[in-house]
Amino acid sequence: MQLEFEKAARTDASCIHDLISEVASRKPDAIAIAAPGRRPLPYRRLLLQLDDTVRALSGAGLERTDRVALVMPNGPEMAAAFLGVAAGATCAPLNPAYREEELEFYITDLHTRAVILAAGMASPARRVARRLRIPIFELVASVDAEAGVFRLEADGGPLAPGKPAFSSPDHVALVLHTSGTTSRPKIVPLTHANLCRSAVSIARTLALTERDRCLNVMPLFHIHGLVGALLSSLSAGSSVVCVSGFDPEAFFGWLDAFEPTWYTAAPTIHQAVLARAAANRDILARRPLRLIRSSSAAMPRQVMKDLEHTFRTQVIEAYSMTEAAHQMTSNPLAPRPRKPGSVGLPTGTEVGIMDEAGRLLAPGEVGEVVIRGPNVTRGYENNPAANAAAFTNGWFRTGDQGRLDADGYLFLTGRLKEIINRGGEKIAPSEVDEVLSQHAAVAQAVTFPLPHPTLGEDVAAAIVLKPGAKASESEIREFAAARLAEFKAPKQVLIVDEIPKGPTGKVQRITLAGRLADALAARRDANFVAADSAIEKEIADLWRDILRAEKVGVRDDFHALGGDSLSMVSMVLEVERRYGVTVPIDRFLKAPTVATLAQLVRPGERGSKEASAGEPPSPRPIKDSLFSGIRNRLFQCLALYAPGYKSARVWLHRRRGVTIGRNTSIGLSVLIETAYPRLVSIGSNVTIGVRVVIIGHLRDATDEARMLNRPTVRIEDDVYLGPGVIVLPNVTIGRGAVVAAGSVVNRSVPPHTLVQGNPARPVARCGASLGGGVSYEQFLRQLTPIKDEES
């Protein structure tokens, strides 16, 4: 899908030199680049700077396909150097904060022919270049001239000019590396045509004119700063203020001094701006912005609301990535509609939703977001394996999950690689971020997966509080639990001063657990309180046995120790058996600690109505079932994990056989039960959904001998058992059935029914051959985790 207003381009230029030349011919004295403490740079002088740079590189023997690394601080010279190098060679801007080993990797990986450094800049890139025998060009800023004017020197003298050879639209202008969160970073080559098409698209989306001015606070070694701020502004003939980088203390001074009409930034920067807005109301009043743009990460709705309220302007969120030369979709300007939760409409890029088989999906269906268009890279450099995985039928697979609505608006539901798989339940961390960000004390929230011994992954969150705000980790956890399904709410919350970021400055969710491991361990050690009373000691010992934990303190969170719904059921049943009480599960889950449980089972709590307050009603007892009491308690526990329990309860306990036919879907929290000699038959191609309990048991002990080798429930071929399904003894699962992660299965299930890896891996197996006539306690105690290699 492509927008109508995107079909007409603002400029016909398809390479950077032509783009600048076109504006310079129309408005030679219009300001192109401004900077603090410097005279502004007009377009005619910027064009001369580009020409001088291309001649200097040509004189040094560099050609249009040669790679030139640019290791510079943010500012007008960095902006002009990028434009000049790209006009006659391939520019490879690198983060000046990289360590020496990182710089060596990138410079080597890019086959760099020259390195440009700011004159006198103390950078490890110098040592790297000398060690690799790569020429170093010193960029000497002309501080008395306009902002961005410089000359290139080598060996103490200026580079001799050569014959200029300007790049064409198909030449690679820019090479950047992906973030590389899980593997070796990939090289993304972007042509002049890619960059110009994206820049024009952004200018078109924002209705930029020559009267606009952008305040750029984004780094110019990232695609956001280079295209989202710099090139988009220049393509419209407007101006851009190039500062030394984002400085929250200087931001409002820049607003006052340069009177920009807009700025673009990542959400973390917007949040830092908001934190200081109250102290700068006078500047906000006299320096209004036409718009604020946000990209590079999902914008929490509350932050967007606060920005619009504070600046009294519209905030435009865009969806972007390096491989698309930045922008792919954007919310439109008013008065066109902006839909809550959407990243907008395609902007010069075709956007589709694709399933795993490579089929494009209809509006409303969720799948992987795919793109194609003139701004999209042709492929990763020297990486056929990555290209084979990234491109399907000409579409680039973004790795993001989402859906398009009937009007063409894109809604992102998560990052496929970032989706948290909690025992088969898929959780989009951005959804949890959104809820946490609504807390009055929270400035920034990042949800991430935490390794879990049985679930595979659990939900955790790192929180940065607003200046002067106070909130405890338990308060924030309860806040989320009140607004999210239980399985989505973070079980661990860690308040930090700053969210750790990756080498490119982005938050990388999948590495946060490792980065925060020491902080999590230190917090637990600092909060550890040993059991004191007899009841606390008994419960702590029970938790140690069930969770196989080395030590358990009275304040330790059950889930943080590795607990899940299954182990919780086992633990609660044992506590109730020992102390003769009914544990109020909902109260325990609000603070799942030994101290809480000990308080609930003290003599004063035993048998009281208060102890049972808030629990869901017990399921209707079945008199001929040996396990009805324990089974009912199991359902009470599961109800806290299944929000649809009360409304979606279906019981199939009948005197005659029950058949569930082909192509049938069975939903949330369903009980399928039978007792010998009646038989439940679940046919082929049946989907059995989340948190279903399937019970195949015997009516009395004498039946066990006669029925030992005969199932009372048969689950046939091609049946999908969804996350959290519990399959109890005397159930046979046929060949080809899929048992999802988080399910509990009898050991007698044939191995070939368990799909290798992915979400189809069960997490527990019964360690003994249990037929009918056993208690749930006996069954649950026999469960052991299944290791990856076993499945």
Image (tube, helix red, strand yellow):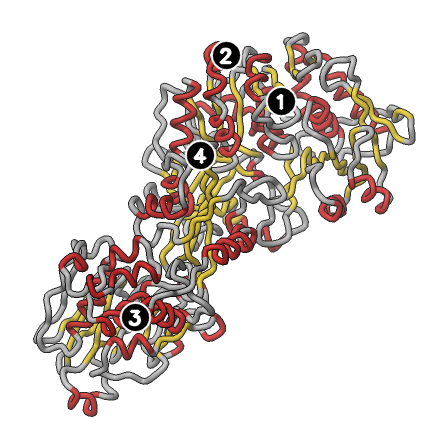
Q: If you read the primary sequence from the N terminus, does the residue marked by circle 4 or circle 1 appear first?
A: 1
Number of the label disc, if any, that sits on residue 299 = 4
- Residue 724 relative to residue 256: left or right: left
> Relative to residue 630, is residue 395 depicted above or below?
above
Is the residue marked by circle 1 packed among few (<14), some (14-19), or many (20+) residues within 10 Å? many
Return the residue at label 3. Answer: 570
Is the residue marked by circle 3 packed among few (<14), some (14-19), or many (20+) residues within 10 Å? some
Query: Which circle, 4 or 1, is nearer the viewer?
Result: 4
Return the residue at label 2. Answer: 287
Name the residue rendered at 38%, 72% in the picture: 541
Of residues 561 and 368, the one nearer the viewer is 561
Give the residue type at disc 3.
Answer: Ser
- Residue 691 relative to residue 343: left or right: left
Query: Which circle, 1 or 3, is nearer the viewer?
Result: 3
Return the residue at label 1. Answer: 13
Q: Secondary structure at mark 2?
A: loop
Q: Position of residue 135 (x, y in %)?
A: 85, 37
Of residues 687 and 573, the one nearer the viewer is 573
Query: Which circle, 4 or 2, is nearer the viewer?
Result: 2
Q: Are marks 1 and 3 in contact (CB under 8 Å)?
A: no
Give the residue type at disc 1.
Answer: Ala
Q: Position of residue 784 (x, y in %)?
A: 39, 75
Give the residue type at disc 2.
Answer: Arg
Where, quadrant-wise, is the N terminus in this rendering?
Answer: top left
Q: Position of residue 506 (x, y in %)?
A: 56, 41
Q: If you read the primary sequence from the N terminus, does the residue marked by circle 4 or circle 2 appear first?
A: 2
Q: Secondary structure at mark 1?
A: loop
